[in-house]
């Protein structure tokens, strides 16, 4: 009788568990990035011990890998613009009135002095650039390591993606260097609903090598509406859209 009771308890404890796959976790992040075309204003606060810097940017995106980011403040950076088309990135510098194509080697540099790099904005094909590890599942969350492939244009050795269950809401991405040391963590702090799924409206990036250093990205306005193709051309870098 005791053996039967133990068997029932063990079965009851596992019956509700659902096996989570790598694709489910990765797709949750891809879907959070791929939404309707939008126009938005972003406030970016860069915090260092004893120092705070704020930048305001306008962004237009087609939701499919193309975006134009234009800096509006502070005054010394106003007019700088960045055009992303997939993994390609071009920059416009108003002081020189020139458009520069940023090579992959420079895209791991800090973006406007923040804890984000340009390569973080360009995203990429997770399936083509990474080899998935084993999914680790616990109460209320699941995570997976994505190991960077040798020939991938990614400056990190691996990523760890974590989601909240049961809704597969993105929770965080931890970035590791080539030696396996955690160097940065991106946390999803707030969401708005877009097309029936969560859209990250506030992100916090922690520099794990410099305690007290972090960057906060917050969408202060959001307008999901069609964006003309002309917004994603070289001409739009200097003129805006």
Image (cartoon, helix red, strand yellow):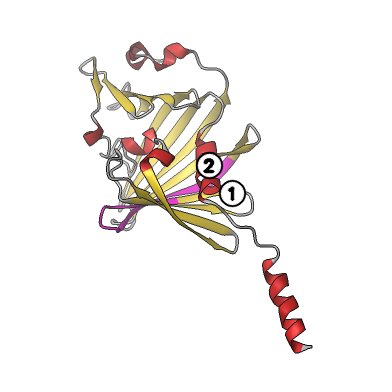
Q: Is residue 204 left or right of residue 226?
A: left
Q: Residue at 37% across / 25% down in the picture?
A: 84
Q: CA distance from mark 2 to mark 1?
A: 9 Å
Classify residue 3 by image quadrant.
bottom right
Classify residue 53 by image quadrant.
top left
Q: Residues within 10 Å of mark 2 (few under 14, many from 20)?
A: some
Classify residue 4 by image quadrant.
bottom right
Residue 205 position (above or below residue 123): below
Residue 66, given in percent of the width and then of the height, sits at 43, 24
Residue 196, given in percent of the width and then of the height, sits at 66, 35
Judge depth for marks 2 and 1 and give the one in front.
Answer: 2
Residue under numbered circle 1:
168
Determine whether the residue tagged by mark 1 lies in a helix, strand or loop.
loop
Q: Is residue 187 magenta?
A: yes
Mark 2 and 1 residues: CB-CB less than 8 Å, in contact? yes
Residues rendered magenta in the picture: 173-191
Q: Is residue 202 left or right of residue 105?
A: right
Q: Is residue 208 left or right of residue 3?
A: left
Q: Is residue 232 magenta?
A: no
Residue 94, given in percent of the width and then of the height, sits at 26, 18
Q: Residue at 53% across / 48% down in the picture?
A: 25
Determine whether the residue tagged by mark 2 lies in a helix, strand or loop.
helix
């Amino acid at each position: 009788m005791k053996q039967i009771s133990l068997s029932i308890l063990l079965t009851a404890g596992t019956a509700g568990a659902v096996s989570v796959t790598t694709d489910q976790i990765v797709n949750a992040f891809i879907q959070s990035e791929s939404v309707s075309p939008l126009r938005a204003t972003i406030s970016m606060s860069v915090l260092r011990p004893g120092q705070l810097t704020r930048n305001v940017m306008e962004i237009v995106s087609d939701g499919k890998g193309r975006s134009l980011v234009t800096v509006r403040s502070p005054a010394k950076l106003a007019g700088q613009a960045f055009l992303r088309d997939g993994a390609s990135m071009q920059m416009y510098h108003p002081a020189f009135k020139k458009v520069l194509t940023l090579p992959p080697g420079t895209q791991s540099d800090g973006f406007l002095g923040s804890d984000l790099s340009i390569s973080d904005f360009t995203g990429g094909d997770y399936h083509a650039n990474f080899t998935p590890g084993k999914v680790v599942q616990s109460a209320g969350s699941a995570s997976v390591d994505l190991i960077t492939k040798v020939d991938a244009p990614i400056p990190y050795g691996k990523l760890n993606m974590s989601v909240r269950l049961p809704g597969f809401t993105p929770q965080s991405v931890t970035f590791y260097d080539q030696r396996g040391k955690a160097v940065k963590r991106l946390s999803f702090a707030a969401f708005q609903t877009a097309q029936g799924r969560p859209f990250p409206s506030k992100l916090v990036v922690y520099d794990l090598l410099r305690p007290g250093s972090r960057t906060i990205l917050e969408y202060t306005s959001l307008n999901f509406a069609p964006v003309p193709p002309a917004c994603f051309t070289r001409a739009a870098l200097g003129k805006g859209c």
